[in-house]
């Protein structure tokens, strides 16, 4: 009996996650999600990709706000806070991490990030906005996309 060889396929997460994407926007729930994802990454020896999605600020531009400066300022502040957190815990444990910024609305930005970074898992904080009950939260939309395991941290 002759054995057939199937072409090799890339499979995400078969031996545990190698890349974990965590959405970070500065909210309390996003910081909890980042901390949870950090623990997962440490235990799995995975890369933690912290992602900030820069919103399009058409309204801000109309009010005279320099859009690129406002967007960059938030990303730089988040990166500074991440570096400080990493420094504080560096004696206890090490995590391989990267910080990325993408542009767009939170759902499309995180989906793009997860695809481009070949994420095995996505971790996000639960929505803190009441309006998301009607429109749907980023987390629900990511789950419905069905392309990655999604963990929602309260």
Image (spheres, helix red, strand yellow):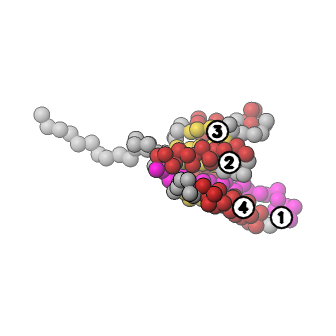
Eye-nearest disc, 2 or 1: 2
Q: Earlier in the sequence, mark 2 or mark 4?
A: 2
Helix, strand or loop under label 4: helix
Q: Residue furthest right?
A: 63
Mark 2, residue position:
31
Front in this rendered view, residue 89 or 133: 89
Residues packed near mark 1 inside 10 Å, few (<14), some (14 to 19) or many (20 plus): few
Location of the N terminus (image quadrant): top left
Which region of the structure is painted magenta? 45-64
Helix, strand or loop under label 1: loop
Q: Where in the figure is residue 62, as x and y percent of width and height?
A: 85, 61
Residue at 55% x, 53% y: name it: 92
Q: In which quadrant of the rendered view does residue 69 lie?
A: bottom right
Q: Residue furthest front?
A: 91
Front in this rendered view, residue 92 or 50: 92
Contact (CB < 8 A) between labels 2 and 1?
A: no
Q: How far, Cα to Cα, is label 3 from label 4? A: 22 Å
- Count numbered badges in the picture: 4
Front in this rendered view, residue 32 or 53: 32
Q: How far, Cα to Cα, is label 2 from label 4? A: 13 Å
Mark 4, residue position:
77
Taking the image as shown, residue 22 lies to the left or right of residue 135, namely left
Q: Earlier in the sequence, mark 2 or mark 1?
A: 2
């Amino acid at each position: 009996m002759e054995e057939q060889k199937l072409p090799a396929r890339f499979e995400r997460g078969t031996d545990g996650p190698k890349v974990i994407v965590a959405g970070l926007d500065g909210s309390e729930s996003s910081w909890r999600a980042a901390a949870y994802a950090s623990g997962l990454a440490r235990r799995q020896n995975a890369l933690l990709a912290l992602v900030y999605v820069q919103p399009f600020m058409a309204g801000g531009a109309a009010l005279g706000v320099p859009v690129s400066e406002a967007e960059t300022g938030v990303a730089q502040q988040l990166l500074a806070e991440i570096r400080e957190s990493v420094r504080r815990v560096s004696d206890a444990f090490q995590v391989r991490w990267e910080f990325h910024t993408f542009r767009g609305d939170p759902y499309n930005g995180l989906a793009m990030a997860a695809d481009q970074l070949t994420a095995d898992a996505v971790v996000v904080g639960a929505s803190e906005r009441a309006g998301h009950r009607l429109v749907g939260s980023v987390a629900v939309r990511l789950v419905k996309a069905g392309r990655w395991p999604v963990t929602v941290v309260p």
